[in-house]
């Protein structure tokens, strides 16, 4: 008898940014480019030393290099859809952070360890068509950014979008918890309690960041996340940004939840936002070898908490990726080929 091949390890929540040299690929607004947080991230990630003639190329080379050299089998790289007007037309003036679906689909095409996480604002007129297009191109996860895209997930007008996602077996990821890195339309949209409607359609839903907020925020949506996790077994939570210094108690709190809740916690980093080092020194030691790669360091920190042995591979199961698959037409195959050739 053969042992089942090990499940691939996946980071289900990473980002790529485009500076805006080619706005069709993606852009940051003037306001976001000038923001102190954007500058800080660029400084912390040592971007200027990367290969590439433009900032976007440097961001792209760093992502490819760090994903390729990390101990992860794959990372989902997320697109970021625009803000849309009530009539479903795109509002570029109100959009501060945009990454096109084609940009992440191309990255996935180029690098077998990258899986495309497309992004669709369900307000857009062609939301259903775009969902079908992204699915046909291989995406199995779609991100909705409640706060930045101004999407209240509880609206009945999104029923057909949720129904189609559930039918296709596409996982919907919603941003939950207060957002700090970009201009926000409403923080209230990030309450996990608003996920009732998509969950009722029966498809799998990921509450990104488990509803956690920073210690200085007015509200904390984490208790609502826990409540929803007990109500819906098709709800998952990812640990993106939870190793940051401003949420330094979040992982400990999550690791004390019930086994049934923890069995639906997925690994996600929020790369390129780097994990905090200081709060976790006792767990990782002063100079962990993983510090060379922020993706690895984030995983190392989170694996020191008790989220179970399947923690890093749960997302693979949810996205339908299996190490042993051999067919060629799905993203699973490119992926399977990599896993296979590595072993
Ligand atoms: Zn994120």
Image (spheres, rainbow, N blue to C red):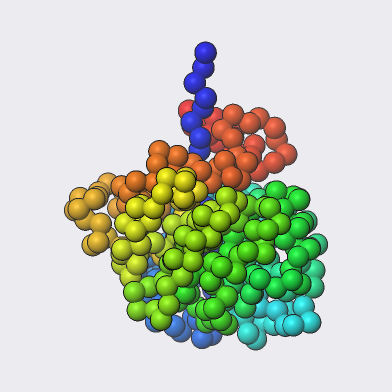
Task: Return the x and y of residue 34 as percentages of the image width and height.
Answer: 46, 84
Q: Residue at x 61, y 65 (%)?
A: 195
Q: Residue at x 63, y 31 (%)?
A: 325
Task: Establish if 56 lies above or below 137.
Answer: below
Task: Return the x and y of residue 159 as percentages of the image width and height.
Answer: 76, 65
Q: Depth check: 106 or 267 in front?
A: 267
Q: Is residue 135 left or right of residue 318?
A: right
Q: Is residue 212 left or right of residue 127?
A: left
Q: Is residue 216 left or right of residue 238?
A: left
Is there any visible trace of residue 314 in the rendered image?
yes
* Number of marks in the rendered image: 0
Q: Depth check: 219 or 102 in front?
A: 219
The quadrant where residue 121 appears: bottom right
Q: Residue lying furthest top in this view?
A: 1
Task: Return the x and y of residue 307 as percentages of the image width and height.
Answer: 39, 46
Q: Residue at x 59, y 29 (%)?
A: 324
Q: Depth check: 221 or 17 in front?
A: 221
Q: Residue at x 23, y 62 (%)?
A: 278
The quadrant where residue 48 appears: bottom left
Is there any visible trace of residue 27 in the rendered image?
no
Task: Return the x and y of residue 281 as percentages of the image width and height.
Answer: 21, 56
């Amino acid at each position: 008898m053969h042992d089942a091949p090990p499940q691939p390890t996946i980071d289900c929540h990473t980002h790529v940014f485009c500076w805006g040299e080619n706005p069709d690929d993606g852009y940051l607004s003037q306001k976001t480019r000038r923001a102190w947080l954007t500058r800080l991230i660029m400084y912390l990630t040592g971007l200027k030393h990367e290969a590439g003639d433009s900032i976007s190329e440097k961001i792209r080379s760093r992502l490819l290099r760090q994903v390729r050299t990390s101990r992860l089998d794959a990372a989902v790289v997320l697109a970021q859809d625009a803000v849309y007007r009530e009539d479903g037309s795109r509002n570029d003036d109100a959009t501060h952070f945009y990454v096109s679906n084609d940009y992440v689909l191309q990255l996935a095409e180029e690098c077998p360890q990258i899986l495309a996480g497309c992004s669709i604002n369900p307000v857009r007129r062609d939301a259903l068509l775009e969902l079908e297009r992204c699915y046909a191109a291989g995406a199995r996860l779609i991100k909705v950014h409640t706060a930045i895209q101004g999407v209240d997930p509880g609206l009945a007008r999104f029923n057909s979008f949720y129904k189609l996602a559930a039918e296709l077996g596409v996982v919907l990821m919603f941003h939950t918890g207060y957002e700090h890195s970009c201009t926000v339309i409403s923080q209230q949209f990030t309450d996990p309690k608003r996920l009732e409607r998509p969950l009722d359609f029966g498809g799998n839903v990921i509450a990104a960041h488990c509803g956690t907020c920073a210690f200085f925020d007015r509200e904390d949506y984490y208790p609502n996340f826990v409540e929803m996790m007990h109500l819906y077994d098709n709800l998952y939570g990812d640990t993106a940004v939870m190793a940051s210094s401003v949420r330094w108690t979040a992982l400990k709190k999550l690791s004390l939840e019930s086994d049934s809740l923890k069995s639906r916690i997925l690994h996600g980093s929020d790369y390129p936002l780097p994990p905090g080092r200081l709060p976790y020194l006792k767990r990782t030691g002063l100079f962990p070898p993983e510090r060379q790669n922020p993706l690895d360091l984030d995983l190392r920190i989170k694996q020191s908490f008790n989220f179970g042995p399947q923690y890093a591979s749960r997302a693979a199961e949810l996205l339908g990726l299996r190490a042993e698959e051999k067919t060629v037409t799905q993203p699973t195959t490119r992926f399977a080929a990599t896993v296979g050739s590595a072993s």
